[in-house]
Amino acid sequence: MAQWTVLGICGSLRQGSYNAELLRLAAELCPEVSIVGRQAAGRLPLFNPDIEDEEVIPEPAREFRSLADVSDGVIIASPEYAHGPSGVVKNAMDWLVGSGGLAGKPTLLMSASPGQAGGMRGHLPLIPTLTLMGAVPVDSVTVSGAPALVDDHGEFHDPAVRERMRLAMEAFSRALSYSRQKSENLRLVDSPTR
């Protein structure tokens, strides 16, 4: 039974994406987390401040912001492009900057790549953006040499990858639990006495 709802942002639109597989594996290894919106970032229009107003915001962007608002945390799985995150992820972040939807939420960064860096350089530029948005980065998972680590169905079968993901999801779950407890304590403090 899922205890937490987590927004999954996949930065790859490729069929058979290794990063989409990381999101699937995260859900498999941590059933108490329900990952929503895995394809939502790919449906977003390019960010344009002229259509950011709630009266005219496109429906995919409205739905994406709503998912962020109700989520307990965020998992971003993105390939690295030119030493940065994918354009899909950058565009998703742009849509969320003004919404406050990531504020205070544990955030797990993941990437899988054919290269030896495993997409790590794509994480670095995201940290200042996430910090500005009030997100709380809790871990980072990178998988290098991804093509050799998936089976015929495109699923990660390598025991080391699965163990690393299991450990990351355990840490993420602890962060989600801590964040919820902290939020509940703040509500108790802020509630009027009777």
Image (cartoon, rainbow, N blue to C red):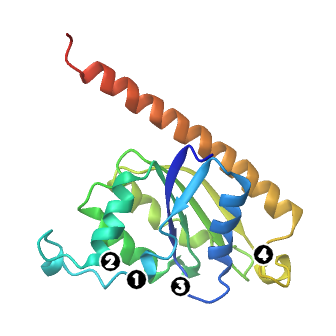
In the displayed image of the protein, which residue is found farthest to the front? 1
In the displayed image of the protein, which residue is found farthest to the bottom? 15
Labels 2 & 1 near each other (Cβ < 8 A): yes
Give 174 or 84, whichever is nearer the viewer: 174
Q: Which amino acid does label 4 sit on?
A: Glu
Q: Which amino acid does label 1 sit on?
A: Arg
Residue drawn at (73%, 55%) of the image:
29
Q: Nearer the viewer, mark 3 or mark 1?
A: 1
- Of callouts 2 and 4, which one flags the residue occurring earlier in the amino acid sequence? 2
Residue at which label 3 appears: 82
- Of callouts 3 and 1, which one flags the residue occurring earlier in the amino acid sequence? 1
Q: In this view, does 142 lie to the left or right of 150?
A: left
Q: What residue type is labelled 2?
A: Pro
Estimate the spatial distance between the alpha carbons at disc 4 and disc 3, rounded to whole Å: 26 Å
Give 122 or 167, whichever is nearer the viewer: 167
Estimate the spatial distance between the alpha carbons at disc 3 and disc 1, rounded to whole Å: 22 Å
Residue drawn at (60%, 46%) of the image:
172
Image quadrant occupied by the C terminus: top left
